[in-house]
């Protein structure tokens, strides 16, 4: 005998039992009074709050049927899809731990993630990948027959490339009679302090680490973005293009749904498609954030009839070039930049939005309530005076629980007083605001003087014709290392290396001027999941210097 979870009218009892501070409790608050409001839009795929809630409950029932227990890790391998969002909340209701995974990862990376986390179940959405068989091929390569490290169950959330695998739709339609009651018990038993999500670091330095977040930390930080930072009104639609497997998009989405807004994204980023989507859906808050995304939007708008006049607030990186580009694209919007990281649940501060854009350039704003930010000497750990550059350290409600199965890395990152050492450099101001200035590990040591590549990159971006720039160090026998630049210029731009270097010499100290500029063609930047991979660029610089006989 079997039953179906669709028989629970509106699932109100289940959602009503979810505790505040959990991810299920977050959605329970957002869905209240908004059953027919659109919760999620992914390209042309839409779900109302009622539909999202019902699907999540069904997935929870299926997981219970698979004997997934509280604390079990459940992988979620998907592009940005509505199935991802449904499954995330289904996992949360079950009291399990969601492990979002990138659909750009290799088979080796997927196998490593499953083995490290002890993944009990892997949920896969095959739609939204570049090819319909990409997901099946990746899973097949990662987990061979009888692989001891493979998840015990691999379930397809949709039908794309699902041949030979159980379908979530079938599991949802056929559950044991007692499962609906078990779902309600599970939902009510989840604590805000339980591990809710594990997100992988980018892994540009070593094997990626699994960052553990409680529901209280990730949900609370997500809501703080909207309650203490960004302006929003009932009915607002908000957009982010980056992958939901990363905290930037994941926390943005959670905050939007917890606030009863409509979250809009695409399966993958394409400039013209994204620009039309933002215009069609009348999205008022945008989170393009990364320079490549902002540039893709600007390229799409050029020569078109696309109008972004309705947009009210846009997040970018904190350089003047990014703010100027934001103002060109979104003439009526507040342009802003905050601060965050994977370990801090993405976004822990926001500048004052009441002033003009000029007042927000170069500041990360104030941290949200319950979060402390300090700037310390990176060697001694001593708190530095205002306006003196040092390492940014953070503690408070946003903080991760640690790196899963890696106590050594956790102890190295969080000191005895609870401060997380971010590896970022910045300054604290007497006003209570602070500003990010660059990565400590990216600092160059030029003749014994610390030099932040971000400073040179910001300068290069002010030169007309410069589209993107990245600076790395090149070994030097006399000065230890010197800066060199990789630059992409706009099409049909007659920009020369001499012009770039002349502009730098005019604006910067001599030791900051790049010793050489190498041009990068569009699409030829080495990328990690979200940014230019400077480790690869550093190797490329060595090879180019040797090949061309460039002297540092």
Image (spheres, rainbow, N blue to C red):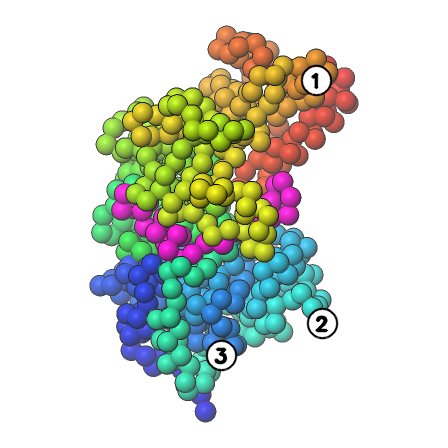
Horizontal and vertical percent for residue 525?
61, 34
Judging from the image, what secondary structure is the residue with disc 3 in?
A: helix
Q: Earlier in the sequence, mark 2 or mark 1?
A: 2
First reached walking from the N terminus: tag 3 or tag 1: 3
Determine the CA span between mark 3 and mark 2. Answer: 22 Å
Q: Sequence order check: which comes first, mark 3 or mark 2?
A: 3
Q: State yes or no: residue 211 in magenta.
A: yes
Relative placement, left or right, of 61 versus 151 is: left
The residue at the point 40 percent across, 50 percent down is 251
Nearer to the camera, 442 or 52: 442
**Location of mark 3 (residue):** 65
Q: Count residues near mark 1 (Cα–Cα under 10 Å), then give few for <14, some for 14-19, many for 20+.
A: some
> Relative to residue 41, is residue 407 drawn left or right?
right
Check disc 2 and report its element: helix, strand or loop.
loop
Residue 538 seen in render: yes
Marks 2 and 1 in Cβ contact (< 8 Å)? no
**Which residue lies at the image location 31% right of the left edge and 30% below the top edge?**
432
Q: Nearer the viewer, mark 2 or mark 1?
A: 1
Provide the secondary structure element on which disc 1 rests. strand
């Amino acid at each position: 005998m079997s039953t179906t979870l669709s028989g629970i009218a509106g699932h109100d009892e289940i959602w009503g039992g979810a505790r505040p501070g959990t991810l299920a409790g977050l959605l329970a608050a957002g869905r209240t009074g908004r059953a027919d409001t659109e919760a999620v839009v992914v390209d042309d795929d839409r779900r109302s709050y009622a539909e999202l809630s019902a699907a999540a409950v069904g997935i929870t029932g299926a997981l219970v049927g698979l004997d997934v227990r509280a604390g079990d890790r459940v992988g979620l391998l998907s592009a940005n899809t509505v199935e991802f969002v449904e499954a995330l909340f289904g996992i949360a209701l079950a009291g399990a731990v969601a492990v979002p995974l990138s659909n750009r990862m290799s088979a080796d990376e997927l196998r490593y993630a499953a083995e490290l986390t002890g993944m009990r179940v892997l949920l896969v959405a095959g739609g939204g990948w570049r090819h319909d068989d990409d997901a099946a091929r990746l899973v097949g390569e990662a987990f061979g027959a009888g692989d001891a490290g493979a998840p015990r169950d691999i379930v397809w959330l949709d039908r794309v490339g699902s041949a030979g695998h159980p379908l979530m739709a079938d599991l949802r339609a056929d559950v044991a009679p007692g499962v609906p009651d078990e779902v309600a018990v599970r939902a009510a038993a989840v604590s805000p302090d339980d591990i809710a999500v594990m997100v992988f670091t980018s892994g540009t330095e070593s094997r990626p680490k699994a960052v553990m977040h409680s529901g209280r930390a990730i949900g609370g930080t997500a809501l703080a973005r909207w309650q203490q930072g960004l302006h929003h009104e009932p009915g607002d639609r908000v957009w982010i293009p980056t992958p939901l497997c990363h905290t930037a998009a994941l926390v943005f989405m959670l905050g939007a749904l917890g606030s009863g807004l409509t979250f809009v994204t695409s399966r993958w980023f394409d400039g013209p498609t994204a620009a039309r989507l933002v215009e069609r859906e009348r999205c008022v808050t945008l989170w393009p954030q990364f320079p490549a995304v902002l540039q893709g939007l600007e390229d799409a708008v050029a020569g078109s009839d696309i109008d972004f006049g309705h947009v009210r607030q846009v997040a970018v990186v904190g350089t003047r070039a990014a703010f100027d580009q934001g103002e060109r694209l979104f003439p009526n919007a507040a342009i802003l930049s905050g601060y965050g990281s994977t370990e801090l649940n993405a976004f822990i501060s926001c500048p004052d939005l009441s002033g003009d854009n000029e007042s927000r350039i170069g500041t990360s704003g104030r941290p949200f309530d319950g979060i402390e930010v300090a700037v310390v000497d990176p060697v001694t750990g001593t708190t530095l005076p205002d306006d003196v550059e040092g390492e940014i350290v953070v503690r408070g409600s946003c903080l991760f629980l640690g790196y899963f199965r890696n106590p050594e890395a956790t102890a190295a990152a969080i000191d005895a007083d609870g401060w997380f050492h971010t590896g970022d450099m910045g300054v604290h101001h007497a006003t209570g605001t602070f500003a990010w200035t660059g990565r400590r590990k990216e600092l160059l040591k030029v003749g014994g003087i610390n030099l932040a590549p971000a400073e040179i990159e910001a300068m290069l971006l002010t030169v007309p014709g410069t589209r993107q720039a990245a600076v790395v160090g090149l070994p030097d026998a006399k000065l230890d290392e010197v800066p060199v630049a990789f630059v992409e210029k706009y099409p049909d731009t007659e920009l020369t290396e001499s012009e770039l270097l002349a502009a730098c010499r005019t604006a910067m100290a001599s030791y900051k001027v790049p010793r050489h500029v190498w041009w990068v063609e569009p699409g030829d930047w080495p990328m990690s999941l979200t940014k230019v991979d400077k480790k690869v660029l550093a190797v490329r610089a060595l090879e180019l210097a040797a090949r061309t006989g460039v002297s540092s």
